């Protein structure tokens, strides 16, 4: 387990309390995030980017903490591991899987920019951050007096700490990624906490301010960034041929179930 703490909104008399856990899967260096609203009687919870082989761990934690898991969501179609969202749905009936409509994959809820994913009195706002893949999104905690401060952004592979997702497959585009990060992430308040889907260097969290100052790729001009991304020369992820097709159906899912589009509010 990488980090664990709770945040409490300070500027409002009603104390909405966010439970937050950062969980790690070491083979793919993937972070899974558990969030819940502890101030709500049901303690509704969601998991962002669960990994199939860690589902038992994640669901035990959910049970131990007395949470009611309602969503298993992905930031994008992962290429390096199989998502746990299908397994979770099989184990906990009623849990809904979530992915972006732009990812062209299957899930119970297909979300788009501007949608709000509510859990209790808290919510995540969806920001479209394509470039690593066509359907990448960043989930950002809500803005408002009832919502946790500082804000938290779950960037998937769009922004990694002192790095970013590669752009050489799955509809990737370095120019699109550059625009996504600069317009959708770097415009958030400077103290916004950034939580990526992976880390290969031992980092757990960063901030908008830190990445705007020190990210060795994204602080460059657009053309220099493109040049860096074209010369990464990374080997393809070992699991890509298994992971991508599996993740197109959220890992394991009844594909006959009709997906619905989330509503913006
Ligand atoms: N070696 C790993 C895959 C490593 C990798 O390609 N990571 C991706 C994110 S997972 S799609 C990436 O974008 N990396 C960017 C970077 O700069 O490292 C494996 O074989 O699974
Ligand atoms: Fe990825």
Image (spheres, rainbow, N blue to C red):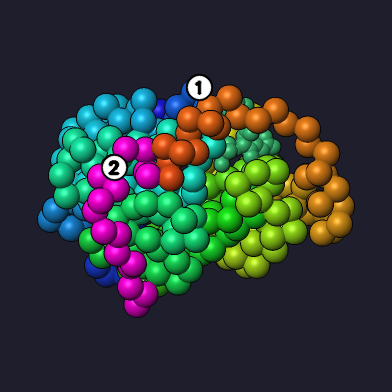
* Residue drawn at 37 percent across, 44 percent down: 249
Q: Position of residue 218 (x, y in %)?
A: 75, 52
The answer to whether residue 46 is visible is no
Q: Is residue 251 magenta?
A: yes
Q: Earlier in the sequence, mark 1 or mark 2?
A: 1
Q: Tell me if residue 227 comes above or below residue 114 in the rendering.
A: above
Q: Which residues are magenta?
A: 249-265
Q: Which mark is residue 78?
A: none
Q: Tell me if residue 264 comes above or below residue 49 in the rendering.
A: below
Residue 162: quarter of image: top right
Q: Which mark is residue 27?
A: 1
Q: Position of residue 39 (x, y in %)?
A: 20, 57
Q: Tell me if residue 198 comes above or below residue 124 in the rendering.
A: above
* Residue drawn at 34 percent across, 63 percent down: 117
* Residue drawn at 83 percent across, 39 percent down: 231
In the rendered image, the residue lying farthest to the top is 27
Q: In the visual, does 214 lie left or right of 250?
A: right
Q: In the visual, does 15 lie left or right of 227?
A: left
The Cα–Cα distance between marks 1 and 2, rounded to whole angstroms, is 24 Å
| Closest to the observer, 56 or 3 | 56
- Secondary structure mostly seen in magenta is loop
| Closest to the observer, 251 or 114 | 251
Helix or strand or loop: what does disc 1 sit on?
loop
Q: Residues within 10 Å of mark 2 (few under 14, many from 20)?
A: many
Number of numbered discs visible in the structure rendering: 2
Helix or strand or loop: what does disc 2 sit on?
loop
Q: Which mark is residue 253?
A: 2
Q: Position of residue 188 (x, y in %)?
A: 58, 65
The answer to whether residue 130 is visible is yes
Q: In the visual, does 98 lie left or right of 56?
A: right
Q: Tell me if residue 54 comes above or below residue 115 in the rendering.
A: above
């Amino acid at each position: 387990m990488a980090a664990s703490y709770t945040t409490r909104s300070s500027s409002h008399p009603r104390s909405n309390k966010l439970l937050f856990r950062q969980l790690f899967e070491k083979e793919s260096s993937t972070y899974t995030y558990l969030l819940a609203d502890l101030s709500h009687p049901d303690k509704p919870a969601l998991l962002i980017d669960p990994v199939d082989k860690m589902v038992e761990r994640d669901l035990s934690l959910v049970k131990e903490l007395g949470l009611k898991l309602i969503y298993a969501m992905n930031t994008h179609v992962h290429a390096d591991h199989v998502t746990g969202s299908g397994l979770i749905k099989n184990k906990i009936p009623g849990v809904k899987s979530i992915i972006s409509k732009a990812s062209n994959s299957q899930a119970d809820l297909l979300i788009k920019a501007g949608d709000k994913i509510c859990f209790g009195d808290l919510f995540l706002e969806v920001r479209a951050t394509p470039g690593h893949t066509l359907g990448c999104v960043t989930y950002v905690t809500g803005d408002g007096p009832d919502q946790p401060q500082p804000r938290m952004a779950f960037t998937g592979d769009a922004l990694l700490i002192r790095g970013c997702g590669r752009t050489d497959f799955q509809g990737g585009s370095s120019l699109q990624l550059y625009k996504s990060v600069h317009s959708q992430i770097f415009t958030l308040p400077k103290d916004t906490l950034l939580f990526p889907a992976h880390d290969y260097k031992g980092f757990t969290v960063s901030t908008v301010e830190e990445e705007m100052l020190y990210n060795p790729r994204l602080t460059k001009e657009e053309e220099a960034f493109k040049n860096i991304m074209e010369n990464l020369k990374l080997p393809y992820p070992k699991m890509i041929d298994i992971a991508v097709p599996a993740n197109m159906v959220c890992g394991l899912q009844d594909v006959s179930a009709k997906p619905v589009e989330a509503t913006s509010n």
